[in-house]
Image: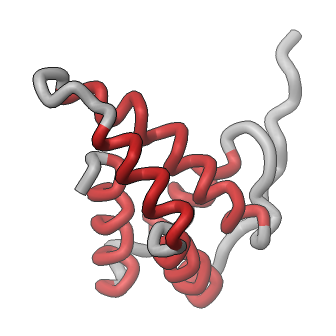
Amino acid sequence: MSAPTPAFPTLDLATAKEALSKAIAAFEVPENKARMEEALASCDPANPMAKMQILIPIVQEIQAVVMKEYKFEGPGAVMAATMQINMFAPQDPEIANGVRMLAAKLSGN
């Protein structure tokens, strides 16, 4: 028998925009920025997958702090919040641009 899936809140457009804005801003916090730059510097340039393997956990940790404010906590919380925010991208150019920025962070840009 599997463990129950945690219930996450549902974001509306305004809250999704706010959460996305805070998520992007979290990458500019000096400690977070330095942590990501240090991780990127440690990557083997000959291994493009190394960036993602190192960055994904860091990005998720940074985002978990932000998403906790919106009651997204526990396993799968960052992904659940990201998916909800991404659902607004087709109807809102600001969210679409923000989602692209987050994806760029995952790839080390």
How far from the left and from the top, in percent, is residue 89?
37, 73
How far from the left and from the top, in percent, is residue 57?
53, 38
Horizontal side of 48 relative to 106 (left or right) equals: left
Question: Foreground residue, 73 or 25?
Answer: 25
Question: Foreground residue, 106 or 45?
Answer: 45
In this view, the residue farthest toward the bottom is 14
In this view, the residue farthest toward the top is 1
Horizontal side of 8 relative to 61 (left or right) equals: right
How far from the left and from the top, in percent, is residue 48?
18, 29
Q: Quadrant of residue 47?
A: top left
Horizontal side of 97 relative to 71 (left or right) equals: left
Q: How is the image coloured?
A: secondary structure
Question: Foreground residue, 42 or 59?
Answer: 42
From the image, which quarter does the N terminus lie in?
top right
Q: Quadrant of residue 90?
A: bottom left
Tell me what residue is drawn at x 45 percent, y 40 percent. Answer: 56
Count of marks, rendered view: 0
From the image, which quarter does the C terminus lie in?
bottom left
Tell me what residue is drawn at x 83 percent, y 42 percent. Answer: 6
Horizontal side of 46 relative to 34 (left or right) equals: left
Tell me what residue is drawn at x 27 percent, y 46 percent. Answer: 107
How far from the left and from the top, in percent, is residue 7?
82, 49
**In this rendering, is residue 49 above or below 68?**
above
Tell me what residue is drawn at x 53 percent, y 73 percent. Answer: 29
In this view, the residue farthest toward the left is 46
**In this rendering, is residue 93 above or below 73?**
below
Question: Foreground residue, 107 or 5?
Answer: 107
